[in-house]
């Protein structure tokens, strides 16, 4: 029996990392490794909140470098691809653009699924979507 997680979307992985990974590794990994991974999960919990205190950004940046150094001590170099390296730059992104919560694509993806559901004519999907969207908005306006 394969115990694999396939077909996860980005939001699913986000929830797994922030909420469930901490519980899943609780009794499995050695203490030092578990602490490093748990600190990374808590770091993502903080930066993904709706509001971040600008005064705490420097402290968070120092913490993320400490966490990455701890991970480098316990995991082989093959573990560290460009995605892990991007964690080091995420605080700069927050300073420039604001909260990560405001930059998420999850609401856009959900709405695109709704719009794709409007497609009834496979040969002209854009026209079909526009037609159904206008009909729905007209009914909302009239009611």
Image: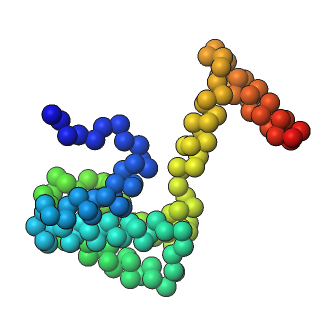
Quarter of the image with the C terminus in it = top right
Q: Residue furthest right?
A: 142
Q: Quadrant of residue 26?
A: bottom left
Quarter of the image with the N terminus in it = top left
Give me the residue at 13% from left, 71% from top: 31
Residue 34 or residue 23, whichever sits in front: 23
Query: Is residue 49 among what the camera can see?
Result: yes
Give me the residue at 44% from left, 50% from top: 11
Q: Quadrant of residue 138?
A: top right
Q: Position of residue 9 (x, y in %)?
A: 41, 43
Q: Position of residue 127 (x, y in %)?
A: 72, 23
Give me the residue at 16% from left, 52% from top: 78
Query: Is residue 72 among what the camera can see?
Result: no
- Could you tell me how many numbered marks the image carries? 0
Residue 77 or residue 41, whichever sits in front: 41
Q: Using residue 27 as the reference point, say whether residue 38 is left or right of it.
A: right
Q: Residue furthest bottom?
A: 55
Vertical comparison of 119 with 98: above or below: above
Q: Quadrant of residue 83?
A: bottom left
Give me the residue at 80% from left, 30% from top: 135
Q: Position of residue 106 (x, y in %)?
A: 52, 49
Q: Position of residue 91 (x, y in %)?
A: 43, 70
Vertical comparison of 5 with 39: above or below: above
């Amino acid at each position: 029996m394969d115990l694999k997680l396939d077909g996860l979307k980005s939001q699913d992985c986000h929830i797994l990392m922030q909420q469930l990974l901490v519980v899943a590794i609780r009794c499995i990994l050695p203490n030092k490794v578990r602490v490093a991974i748990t600190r990374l999960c808590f770091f993502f919990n903080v930066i993904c909140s709706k509001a971040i205190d600008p005064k705490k950004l420097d402290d968070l940046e120092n913490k993320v470098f400490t966490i990455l150094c701890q991970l480098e001590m316990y995991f082989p170099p093959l573990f560290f691809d460009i995605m892990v390296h991007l964690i080091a730059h995420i605080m700069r992104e927050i300073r420039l653009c604001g909260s990560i919560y405001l930059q998420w694509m999850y609401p856009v993806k959900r709405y695109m699924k709704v719009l794709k559901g409007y497609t009834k004519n496979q040969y002209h999907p854009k026209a079909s979507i526009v037609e159904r969207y206008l009909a729905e908005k007209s009914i909302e306006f009239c009611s």
